Image: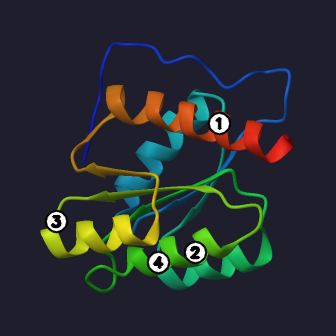
Amino acid sequence: MIKSSNSRVSHPDPTTRPFHLLLVDDESSVLQTLRMVLENEGYQVMTAESCAQALTLLQKDSSFDGVITDLNMEEEDIGLEVARIALQTKPRPVVIVLTGFASLANSRQALDLGIDYMAHKPVELSDLLPALSRLVSRRRESDSQ
């Protein structure tokens, strides 16, 4: 589930190539809604409905600026596998984990992997969008130096 807000978030800088995101969630309504929101914010978005599909896309395309994955899909905590593989790609994308089922154990695992941001469902767009924009902008700046 996604919570909307009335606050507008600044778009990625239009003078550079659009930020390229991989969005992973097994709930197609969440996937498509979040995709539309992100595309409206100026991001290029590819989607995957499973861990396996996400891993295939990550192996084919290492140009993602960010990966946003659900934690629990076809298996409990399988989103951590998506995060782990994403964190190994070069250049390293920003990795965000979304979950409605956070526990101390899976939150600790996510942080130990080095994810950049963890959000709880229903996702607050007024929190997620500025964090995403800030993180991918910083990542691109550090990659260009």
For marks 1 and 3 on the same chain, the one whose residue lies earlier in the sequence: 3
Q: Which residue is pictured at 18% across the width and 75% down the height?
A: 105
Q: Which residue is mark 3?
A: 101
Please state if 40 lies on the left or on the right of 122 as rendered. Answer: right
How far is mark 2 from mark 4, CA to CA?
A: 6 Å
* Amino acid on which disc 1 is placed: Arg
Q: Are marks 1 and 4 in contact (CB under 8 Å)?
A: no
**Looking at the figure, which quarter contains the C terminus?**
top right
- The one of 48 and 62 positioned closer to us in this rendering: 62
* Amino acid on which disc 4 is placed: Ser
Q: Which residue is pictured at 68% across the width and 50% down the height?
A: 65
For marks 1 and 4 on the same chain, the one whose residue lies earlier in the sequence: 4
* Structural crowding at the residue carrying mark 2, measured as other residues with C-alpha within 10 Å and reported as few (<14), some (14–19) or many (≥20): many
Secondary element under disc 4, as helix, strand or loop, is loop
Of circles 3 and 4, which is in front? 3
Of circles 1 and 3, which is in front? 1
Q: Are marks 2 and 1 in contact (CB under 8 Å)?
A: no
- The one of 137 and 111 positioned closer to us in this rendering: 111
Q: Above or below — where is 4 with respect to 20?
A: above
How far is mark 2 from mark 3, CA to CA?
A: 20 Å
Secondary element under disc 3, as helix, strand or loop, is loop
In which quarter of the view is residue 29 placed? Answer: bottom left
Of circles 2 and 3, which is in front? 3
Secondary element under disc 2, as helix, strand or loop, is helix
Q: Which residue is mark 4?
A: 50
Q: Which mark is residue 138?
A: 1
Q: Which residue is mark 2?
A: 54
Direction top: furthest residue: 7
How far is mark 2 from mark 1, CA to CA?
A: 24 Å
User: Does the rendering let one see residue 43?
Assistant: no
